[in-house]
Image (cartoon, helix red, strand yellow):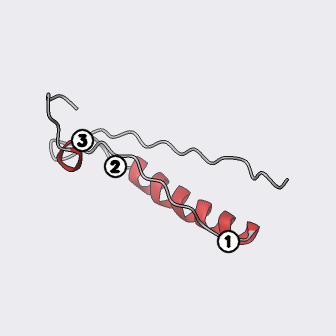
Amino acid sequence: MNQEHGDLLTDGDMYRAAGLNLSDSEFMELMRGIGALIQKAMLNEPSPERTARNIATIIPERKDK
């Protein structure tokens, strides 16, 4: 954010968290889907219409394992 009083939606800065109940296979399917979307977006070449963005994932280890 480059402003004293930024607008999170306009600036593109955000943090999102979601608790999900997934089996191991459902979790892997979700991760493959997210990975495929990110890989597709990584093929985009820079252009005046595009802004460089960073996406990070943090997936805590299951506590019951």
Q: Residue at x 51, y 60 (%)?
A: 18
Whether residues under marks 2 and 3 lie with C-beta atoms below 8 angstroms apart, the answer is no
The residue lying at 46 percent from left, 60 percent from top is 37
Q: Crowding at label 2, few (<14), some or many (≥20) Cα neighbours within 10 Å? A: few
> Is residue 29 depicted above or below 36 in this figure?
below
Residue 20 is situated, as x and y percent measured from the top left of the image, at 59, 66
Residue denoted by label 2: 44
Q: Secondary structure at mark 2?
A: loop
Does 27 sit above or below residue 64? below
Is 13 situated above or below 62? above
- Secondary-structure class at tag 1: helix
Q: Tell me how many marks there are.
A: 3
Amino acid at dot 2: Asn
Residue position marked by numbered label 1 in the rendering: 26
- Label 2, label 3: how far apart the Cα atoms are: 11 Å
Left or right side of 44 for 48: left
On residue 6, which mark appears?
none
* Residue nearest the viewer, comparing 4 with 28: 4
**Mark 3 closeness class: few <14, some 14–19, many ≥20 residues within 10 Å:** few
Does label 1 or label 3 sit earlier along the sequence?
A: 1
> At which x and y percent is residue 12?
26, 45
Disc 3 target residue:
51
In whole angstroms, how far apart are the C-alphas of marks 1 and 2? 28 Å
Of badges 1 and 3, the one in the foreground is 1
* Residue type marked 3: Thr
